[in-house]
Image: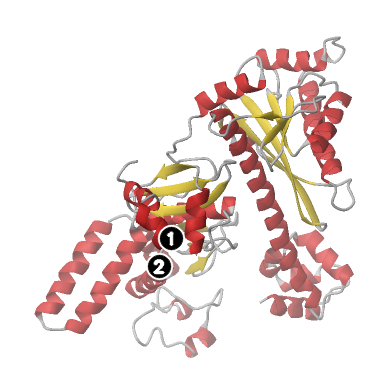
Amino acid sequence: MPHQPGVYLMKDRLGSIIYVGKARDLKKRLSSYFLASRKTRADLKTRALIDTIVDFEFHLVRNEAEALLLEGKLIKDYRPRYNVAFRDDKRFLLVKLQPSEPWPRFVLTRMKKDDGARYFGPFAHSGALRATISWLNRKFGLRACRPLNPGENDYRHCNADVIRNCSAPCILRITRDAYLARIDEACQVLDGKGRREIFSDLEADMAKAAGRLDFEKAALLRDVLDNLKKTLNPTRQFTRGRGVPTTVKPTEDLADLGEALGLEGPPRVMECFDISNVSSNHIVASMVRFTEGKPDNQNYRRYRIRTVAGQDDFASMAEVIRRRYSRILGENADANPDDEYSQEDPLERQRRLAKEGRAKIVLPDLVIVDGGKGQLSMAVRELRNLGLFDLPVIGLAKQREEVFFPGESDPLLIPHDRGALKLLQRIRDEAHRFANGYNALLYRRRMKESLLDDCPAVSPKKKQALLSRFGSVDRIRKASVAEIAALPGISEKSAQVILEWLG
């Protein structure tokens, strides 16, 4: 193991991730688990974890802040049973700036949206970030008040201008161009530009204050400097399957998988399906695609189950398999109308189109369904109905990591130390994570929409009209009274009540 900062993932005998941790020094941290004294002195939970560890992998990062960010992301993705922190939906803080506002200001948020705003972060140290934003507002005279477009009335109830913390744009003491120039300077600081000069200036001011025996000011400057260093410490944003050095060996694992399954060669393109039905309200499915043994994020797909009533994993799997591969066949047929009357086998035709570079979507070399014989049989039935009789498809059962083949009663048990099984586990875990993430997204949307249920001015019919017109509660908040009142059955007074209710 290297003496470098990073994140480690502990696994049990089935290859499931049971614990995610971070370390300033991976070698020292991981070796501490396997000291004889650790097992005798540790608490019951840690001893149980140590007894369960069979394998681990690690990811290298540049510093402790990156390790903290990546640890939180992986815990949310895999929800290991021995982790307690970071398992909720709470995310690290971001800084948001909406340039379209009359007088933009910095706002802290935990969710990045496609709303035209500029985002900075995420930041690992929330306390340091809040103190840094407060310092930036004072240094550049930026407003911190909440009104979208503050005016004379807001100025009367504000003391920020009196204590020289704000440039008072609300009473036009500064032009908008000059204010935006200050915003731009503050943004450059958050981007990390010129941070060495900022640190040097603060250190010099701190030394001068100490030389004048003004230790209170020196202490304040010291705190500002410490917070800036924590906030502006360069960190990467970790996105799904990208930018993380890892111990995984996709090429070797891919070759091993092809050999283990008896395929003609390594399955260079694989698609895996998972069903997530936390409740009957939101039954969803995911499809993740791996190319050359690595996540192909651009070709992930998620589905809301349409034709199945209640929780029925078998019928849900049938629906999503049918929708996925009928669409591939349909889009490739539309892209190649001259092949409409070809007498070729459908699978052979798709392979030929892919080889000639004429397939809009390439069929996978292997289809994986999360589940046992039931899910597999439904997938096989749908593929055969589409004419894809020879498309390789397997089922991966969770309990013993058994690999099921169509028409065979006995499963294949791949040894847990082989890369073939580790690759299957990675794609299955990624499909599971992606499906659960979609379910969580729909749940959060539903919780937001439920705000309208308690609004005195909104009936079920009006709620449906509002969501049909604006799409979400957030967009309703941003709408004007006139836009809401334009809907049938909603007066201007009701529109005003709705906006006040939503805050």
Q: Find residue 216 and report its horizontal and vertical position in percent.
A: 21, 84
User: In the displayed structure, would residue 477 be above or below residue 454?
Assistant: above
* Cβ atoms under marks 2 and 1 closer than 8 Å: yes
**Residue 391: x and y, percent?**
76, 21
Q: Give the residue type at disc 2.
A: Leu
User: According to the image, label 1 marks what residue?
Assistant: 123
Q: Which residue, as the protein is rendered here, is positioned at the far top?
A: 343
Residue marked by disc 2: 129
* Whether residue 179 can be seen here: yes
| Residue 295 visible in the shown view | no
Q: Position of residue 426 (x, y in %)?
A: 59, 38
Q: Quadrant of residue 292?
A: top right
Q: Secondary structure at mark 1?
A: strand
Q: CA distance from mark 2 to mark 1?
A: 7 Å
Query: Seen in the image, is 159 located left or right of residue 308?
Result: left
How dense is the environment of label 1, judged by Cα within 10 Å: few (below 14), some, or many (20 and up)? many
